[in-house]
Image (cartoon, rainbow, N blue to C red):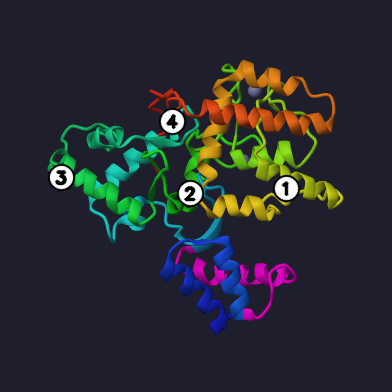
């Protein structure tokens, strides 16, 4: 059994006490503790994680990384590997609160628009008795009497604890803890996966062909379409995929071209200073909505991307397309297609 040093303990403590940590923060804590930069000591970093996880497995915990699908950033967190909500959430939340959480998660993953969100009203209207497994002869009073104000309070707490998140457009989405925690549940419950990375696609872009079920995360599209010279078509049905590259991404693309077209590492994308600024200023979300709107505006975007003879005019066309969509973005919000599917319940 490997024994952990104070360095390992400090890393675990940092994640436990400060909640899920952004990759950048977690890496910098690692560098501070070990005095080694992660770029040149990737192997050492992986050894640390491996050792920590061997120890944590004895108490059914795991330190893992996941990507928050709304901001595209990687987070590290410790999760409880015991597979029932009572043991994960039970120390803090009541039985009806946990049932409510499950109902919200199910509603979010069934969002067929790929936004991965529900409105507060939709959340408040979730009926807890639907969460009862098997024949519901008698509804427990705790569930029956769970009031609207108790639901509001619970949503607030879930967001504070990062089980849920409030999205930029005022809706409710999955929190980082849920992304960390529910990975295997997503896979076991028909949650459609991303065609590029094979992780669940809660917040993803849909193939413009309505009869095709391909979904791809925005950040996976970026890696697929802008960093490589792949054809901008759906990998499933071959339909032209309207992809608008932002100015920041274009800088990135040019830098990559200069750097001998190194293939991108999926979990650790190289970023230009410009694109980093975009994310730090939190203005990534509007560009994602621009993209989504361009998806709804299929014909226009398709014709734009078809008239591109050379790379230079391609870039110009991209800029023009971007400007056009920006103007378009001033209109009303994106349409909401919503699922009525009730299949994937949180059964364990
Ligand atoms: Zn993906
Ligand atoms: Zn398709």
Is 76 a magenta residue? no
Q: Tell whether label 4 touches label 3 (CB within 8 Å).
A: no
Check disc 1 and report the residue beneath it. Answer: 252
Circle 2 SS class: helix
Picture quadrant of residue 173: top left
Range shown magenta: 34-61
- C-alpha span from label 2 to label 1: 28 Å
Check disc 2 and report the residue beneath it. Answer: 179
Q: Say which mark, if any, is on residue 142.
A: 3
Check disc 4 and report the residue beneath it. Answer: 111
Q: Is residue 34 visible?
A: yes
Which percent across, then down, holds residue 145? 13, 41
Is 58 a magenta residue? yes
Sequence-wise, the earlier of marks 3 and 2 is 3
Ligand 1 closer than 8 Å to label 1 CB = no
Sequence-wise, the earlier of marks 3 and 4 is 4
């Amino acid at each position: 059994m490997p024994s952990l040093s104070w360095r390992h303990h400090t890393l675990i403590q940092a994640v436990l006490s400060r909640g899920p940590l952004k990759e950048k923060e977690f890496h910098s804590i690692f560098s501070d503790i070990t005095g080694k930069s992660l770029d040149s000591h990737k192997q050492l970093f992986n050894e640390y994680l491996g050792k920590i996880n061997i120890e944590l497995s004895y108490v059914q915990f795991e330190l893992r990384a996941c990507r928050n699908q709304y901001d595209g950033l990687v987070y590290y967190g410790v999760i409880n590997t015991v597979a029932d909500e009572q043991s994960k959430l039970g120390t803090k939340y009541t039985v009806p609160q946990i049932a409510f959480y499950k109902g919200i998660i199910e509603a979010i993953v069934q969002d067929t628009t790929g936004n991965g969100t529900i409105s507060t009203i939709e959340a408040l209207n979730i009926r807890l008795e639907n969460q009862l497994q098997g024949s519901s002869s008698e509804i427990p009073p705790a569930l029956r009497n769970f009031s609207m104000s108790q639901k509001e309070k619970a949503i607030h707490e879930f967001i504070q604890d990062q089980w849920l998140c409030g999205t930029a457009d005022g809706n409710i989405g999955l929190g980082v803890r849920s992304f960390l925690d529910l990975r295997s549940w997503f896979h076991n419950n028909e949650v459609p996966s991303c065609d590029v990375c094979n992780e669940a696609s809660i917040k993803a872009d849909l193939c413009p062909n309505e009869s095709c079920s391909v979904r791809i995360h925005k950040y996976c599209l970026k890696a697929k379409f802008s960093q490589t010279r792949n054809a901008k078509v759906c990998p499933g049905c071959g339909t032209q995929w309207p992809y608008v590259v932002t100015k920041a991404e274009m800088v990135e693309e040019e830098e990559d071209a200069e750097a001998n077209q190194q293939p991108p590492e999926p979990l650790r994308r190289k970023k230009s200073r410009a694109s980093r600024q975009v994310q730090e200023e939190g203005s990534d979300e509007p560009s994602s909505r621009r993209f989504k709107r361009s998806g709804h505006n299929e014909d226009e975007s398709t014709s734009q991307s078809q008239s591109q003879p050379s790379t230079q005019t391609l870039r110009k066309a991209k800029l023009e397309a971007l400007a056009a969509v920006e103007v378009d973005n001033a209109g009303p919000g994106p349409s909401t297609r919503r699922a009525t599917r009730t299949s994937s319940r949180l059964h364990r």
